[in-house]
Image: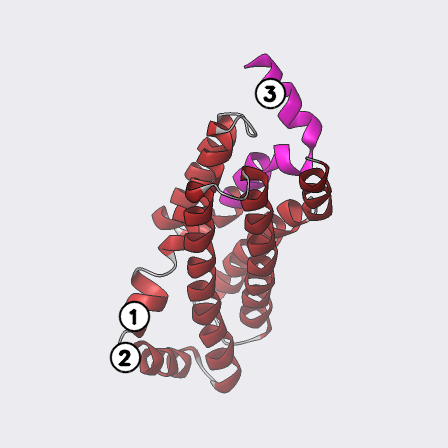
Amino acid sequence: MRAKNRTMTSHRSDFVLAPALFGAYGLIRILDGLDGERGPGLAWTAGHLCFVVGLFFFVRGFVAMRALAGPRDRWATAGLVAAVAGSFALTVQFGVDIVTGLMADSHAEMGRLSDNFGSLPGAELAFYAVGPMFFFVGQVILGLRLFALRKLPVWSPCLLFTASLLPLTTKDLIPLGAVLLLAGYAPLWRPSASRTALTSA
């Protein structure tokens, strides 16, 4: 138990930094599109770097959530594997966006370079259509499993699920999704919030 507590203590900042960087990407993306098109340029690169660094903290958080569930919990393991796979797909997708943004002199040229990568066998499926979905699915599985183990209140996985749906509706809602993620993870970066919620449940 002490080892788990130490693990969560060392990872508290991950549950703040990950949503914050996710939200920063969403805000920069909106600002970048005010002129009618997004990228290439400083805003495009900075926004995408925020997201990629955010994924690093998300993965650290997912590992901590898996550890909190216990060493033999298959559902938590499945959630972690899915979330990490989705994080990898998103890292590749955003990495390609960063590279094409640095290589291209115009939005149209950037699109052509991106299409060249997307046309590779399996790339569209693995890094765009299906692969990234595992990030959201794994995140929700981990939240639900910790709720089932009474380590998170019911509203936490509900917020994680809602936040996962928002970008699928429109990417302009990413900043709102980041706020919901920050709130959903609150019991993990504010342990007192978890104890209060579970005690009153």
Rendered image quadrant of residue 165:
top left
Residue 106 tag number: none
Q: Secondary structure at mark 3?
A: helix
Residue 119 tag number: 2
**Residue interval drawn in magenta:** 177-201
Q: Nearer the viewer, residue 200 or 174?
A: 200
Dot 1 amino acid type:
Glu
Residue denoted by label 1: 124
Q: Nearer the viewer, residue 119 or 199?
A: 199
Residue denoted by label 3: 197
Q: Is 162 in the magenta?
A: no
Q: How far, Cα to Cα, is label 1 from label 3?
A: 42 Å
Dot 3 amino acid type:
Ala
Other residues around mark 3 within 10 Å, as few (<14) / some (14–19) / many (≥20): some
Q: Residue at x 59, y 13 (%)?
A: 200
Q: Main secondary structure of the magenta part?
A: helix
